[in-house]
Amino acid sequence: MTKVAQQIPSSAPSLTARAPSFFFNGHPPRRRALVVLLAVLAGFALTVVWSAKFVDRTIGGTVADSLLGHPADGAPIAGVTAGIAFALATGVAGTFTACNVAVFSALAPLTGKAASRRGRVAAALRPLGWLAVGALTVSAAYGVVVALVGTSMPQFAQTQGGQGFSPRLVQAMVVYGLIGLVMAYLGFAALGVVRDPLARVSARFPQAPMVAMGALIGAFLIGRPFSLFRQLFRDAAESHNVLYGAGAFALQTLGNLVVMSVLLVAVSVVFGERLHRWMTANPRRVSALTAAAFIAAGVFLVLYWDVRILARRDLIWYPMAPWAG
């Protein structure tokens, strides 16, 4: 009787075991709590040191000015052609804004999966194509909505509500807070703590997870308060041209994806061989890296766009570096 009892646990499947999927490779890290703790600390630390003024104006503004050949901020957008150029330039310039920090978490599942250099580049670019499908679809659809609804959109409002909470700021807090929660959930799914929400869909359609992550990236435009994007937003809203709205918003997102693609290819070429050896030596490292990237991005979005904004309105206290104001 004792022998039978001892054999049951070893032969029965674990109640917490989950089938491998896109986000969960079936090999959770041994120290999942440590992975979560380090990811949360990384996301929190980034909110403490992040300076929106430096990134948006110094980096984003300088890049946009250089690409357009004239000061972008406040310059009139003269016609559809100028608007298309403005959209692409400001999309590239806005890659490193606080809106897009979470985008780089999507790179984690794509790195170091192939042994050869050509294979690594191909393995990165194919999923990026599906990522672009999701991102461009959502951003173009939002551009159509903006062109149809026009100046009554909350993002168009210039009024300041109580404690400085304008309609567009509230919209940004809601949108990025929700995206942050989704990112954090995907991180826990990568650890095998919760169920992968796309497990069944990705079993039939392997591209579905990348399309879904692309949709999250495209949704960044729904809440983006980046000043140069607001300028494009106003132009599209006032034009009431759905083709222009869709094209301009899609190009904004495309500008982000171009920089991401270049960075991913560079990482795959320069560090890909080492990453491949490091990851294949222990598949638990892949789940740890993927989970940490998503959780850190999710924590950053929630803390930066919801908690830190409350502190900026003197409603709560939140630690911030001296240059982060």
Image (tube, rainbow, N blue to C red):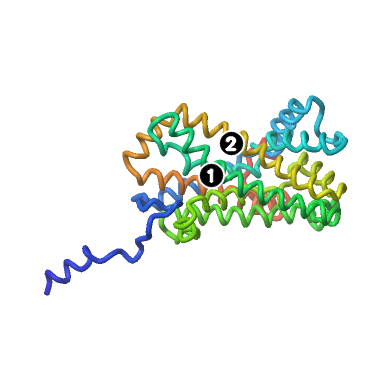
**Type of amino acid at the residue the image marks with label 1:** Ala
Residue visible at 80% across and 44% down in the picture:
244
Question: Which x, y percent locates residue 154?
Answer: 80, 56
Picture disc at residue 170: none
Give the structural element (helix, strand or loop) at label 1.
helix
Judge the density around disc 2: few (<14), some (14-19), many (≥20) Cα neighbours within 10 Å. some
Is 315 displayed left or right of 292 in the figure? right
Note whether 113 is above or below 189 in the view shown: above
Which residue does the numbered mark 2 point to in the structure image? 260
Q: Which quadrant, please, contains the C terminus?
A: top right
User: Is residue 205 left or right of 237 when viewed as pictured?
Assistant: left
- Locate residue 4 relative to residue 134 in the image: left or right: left
Residue holding disc 1: 106
Q: Mark 2 or mark 1: which comes first in sequence?
A: 1
Residue that appears at 86% across and 34% down: 75
- Alpha carbon distance from label 2 to label 1: 10 Å
Quarter of the image for the N terminus: give it.
bottom left
Do residues under tags 2 and 1 come within 8 Å of each other at their CB atoms? yes
Q: Which residue is drawn at 71% across and 49% down?
A: 140
**231 or 242: nearer the viewer:** 242
Q: Is residue 165 in sight in this rendering? A: no
Where does residue 292 sit, x and y in percent of width and height?
47, 46
Residue 287 lies left or right of residue 14; in this view the side is right
Amino acid, disc 2? Met
With respect to residue 173, does 320 lie above or below? Answer: above
Is there any visible trace of residue 306 in the rendered image? yes
